[in-house]
Amino acid sequence: MSQRLRIVTKVRILRDQAWSSASRSILVIEDESLIAMVVCMFLEEAGFKVCGVARTAAQALDLAARMQPDAAVVDIRLGPGPDGIEVAERLSALYRCGIIFVSGSGERETIDRALSVEGAVFLQKPVDPEALVSRLWTLLSR
């Protein structure tokens, strides 16, 4: 069995065991196109509705205002301008949006800052799709 098929199978099992996620909308905030595409694929395979993909803080805030997502998967480093933590703080405050940070940064200060956002979860890149889906279901069931 190929690696991709094993991952897809695990995600489908998780989806089948959990409550319905079809009505749950997720905003993906990631400046790397390939990573955003892969994250979207995992989420859609698990039955979530990806309501948008933002590459910058400004795009994320604009999409969130229009789509009012249930949760956001947020990269911390978004290039020039506000970082993902600042965006997540605003999303959490304005829309009561669940936050899952995904980052390649292992810096303790960055992780602590990210986890200071109320209810936020931190996952290290490369992200395990099973962990991402499982954490989203847990976050949204609160």
Image (cartoon, grey):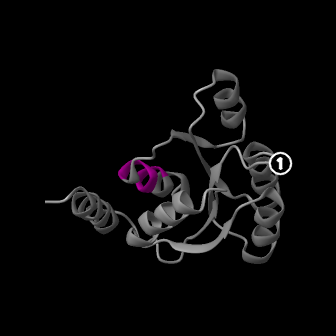
Question: Residue 24: horizontal and vertical position, in percent?
Answer: 55, 71
Q: Is residue 132 magenta?
A: yes
Q: Which residues are magenta?
A: 130-135
Asked which quadrant contains residue 41, the reply is bottom left
Compared to residue 67, the image places residue 14 above or below, namely above
Front residue of this view, candidates 77 and 112? 77
> Residue 87, how many percent across, how many down?
78, 51
76 relative to 27, above or below: above
Residue 123 in percent (x, y) is at 51, 41
- Could you tell me what secondary structure mostly forms the magenta stretch? helix
**What kind of element bears circle 1?**
loop
Seen at 45% across and 46% down, the residue is 127
User: In the image, what residue occupies the spot 76% across and 48% down?
Assistant: 79
Report the side of 134 relative to 141 (left or right): left
Q: Is residue 26 magenta?
A: no
- Compare residues 92 and 41 and report the one nearer the observer: 41
Category of crowding for the residue at label 1, using alpha-carbon neighbours closer than 10 angstroms: few (below 14), some (14–19), many (at least 20): few
Q: Is residue 129 above or below residue 101?
A: below
Residue in front for this viewpoint, 97 or 76: 76
Q: Which residue is mark 1?
A: 80
Image quadrant in which the N terminus is located: bottom left
Q: Amino acid at mark 1?
A: Pro
> Residue lying furthest left in this view?
1
Residue 91 drawn at (x, y percent): 77, 56
80 on left or right of 88: right
Q: What residue is rendered at 66% in x and 34% in y?
A: 115
What's the residue at 72%, 31% (across, down)?
A: 113
